Amino acid sequence: MHAFFTDDDFQFAVENVLGSTWSRAADVGEVLATVDRIPNRDARAWVEQWSATAERVAGEARAAEAAGHLRSAAARWLRAAGYWSEASDKADSTDGATQLWESHRHAWDRFVDCTVAVGDVAVERLEIPWAGTTLPGYSFRRAADTAPRRTLVYTNGSDGSVVGAWSRGIAEALARGWNAMTYDGPGQNAALMRQGLTFRPDWENVLTPVIDALTERSDVDPGRIAVMGISQGGYWVPRAAAHEHRIAAAVADPGVVDVSTTMLQQLPHFLVRLLDDGKREQFDRDMAWALKLSPATRATMRWRMRPYGVTSPFDFFTAAREYALTDEQLAAITCPMLVTDPEHEQFWPGQSARMAAALTCPVTLLPFTADEGADGHCEPAAVGLRNERVFDWLDEHVPAPDR
């Protein structure tokens, strides 16, 4: 595949944005023109240029709204939301990361409102009761169809946006006659940014209240609820499915058995030993010296620690180790499971096959390859192929009542 950047994170991000063109959440020309203005490894330029593109597209969205072209306005707001999300992902506090995230969410909400006004899709903002507060979410269905339907519950990863939920789940679900919903769990999106809620490993205590709320809706068939987990959601969804047995089918993209491996493999052995020995003060002191040498790594660490609700590197790595599935938990899953297995998985290599081997429920291990342009974590540049295969499997395992 063509390399836009030598920096792996930049390259992966560009492939993700290009993949989202499948669902009209980006436009190829806008993406290529923006990428062309960004020097390799220049995070500040990344933030500035994606922000500039988002601002321009948002201006065109406002003009379309004012002229009554709501379908065009919706499309432009969706793209602007995705571009602002890209800017916020690599921004720090000095770049206005919070405001960029708010701009992305505002653009998304304008997309929602314009979509509703067009009249094809009904969208409802949700407040899901949870742990003495609420979790924000969105439900989607075809506007003219209020009958109980199959419903896809989309669970994001550690840093996925609502635009990603649209591209990798919601749009395709609607096209195939499903209802869909997505929610911000603790540590994700608005639950983190506006409510200060942080990650937790026991996702059954998150997903079960979500399903409780869905089963009370007249437009949801409670026997046909499927759940999809993307990226770190490939840990959360199987963890929840081990306890929550109202799920008709589940997708893990990819399968994640132990979240901490992607973090621990970057540590030198002496730091892992300090972690194992519980030497918090020495670990943090040695990490501080190492991070002084790399401002980029220091910024990444701050960003990665925030949803865990910690500021100590020792606490971060220790917490990550709690996000691991046992064979007993995997054996407790009863619903059919699809586990994607992309070639060149860079974050959790080999864990999809490991998960599939430990499952005792009906399981499908679905490969994606470089020859198909579908390799890499969550098949970033092959959203169309990925959605076709995943939803074909869902249609087979959670068929509509009239099939």
Image (tube, helix red, strand yellow):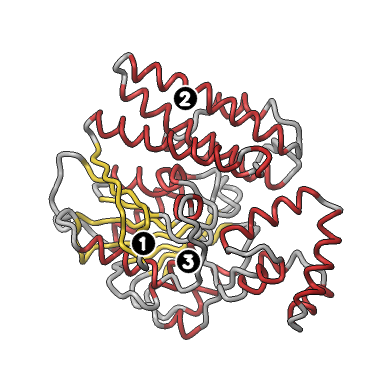
Dot 3 or dot 2, earlier in sequence: 2
The three-letter amino acid code for the residue at tag 2 is Ala
The location of residue 204, given as percent across then percent down, is 39, 72
Residue at 59% over, 48% down = 371
Residue 30 located left or right of residue 264: left
Dot 2 or dot 1, earlier in sequence: 2
Total numbered labels: 3
Q: Which quadrant of the view contains residue 354?
A: bottom right
Of helix, strand and loop, which one carries label 1?
strand
The three-letter amino acid code for the residue at tag 3 is Leu
The location of residue 112, given as percent across then percent down, is 33, 36
Do tag 2 and tag 1 residues touch (Cβ < 8 Å)?
Answer: no
The answer to whether residue 222 of the structure is visible from this angle is yes
Which residue is nearer to you in this view: 294 or 345? 294
> How many residues crowd mark 2 within 10 Å: few (<14), some (14–19), many (20+)?
many
The three-letter amino acid code for the residue at tag 1 is Thr
Nearer the viewer's eye, disc 3 or disc 1?
1
Q: Disc 3 marks which residue?
A: 365
Give residue 58's mark.
2
Of helix, strand and loop, which one carries label 2?
helix
Nearer the viewer's eye, disc 2 or disc 1?
1
Residue at 17% over, 53% down = 219
Q: Disc 1 marks which residue?
A: 133
> How many residues crowd mark 1 within 10 Å: few (<14), some (14–19), many (20+)?
few
Task: Give the spatial CA distance, label 2 vs label 1.
Answer: 32 Å
Give residue 105's mark.
none
The answer to whether residue 11 of the structure is visible from this angle is no
Task: Give the spatial CA distance, label 3 vs label 1.
Answer: 37 Å
Residue at 60% over, 37% down = 87
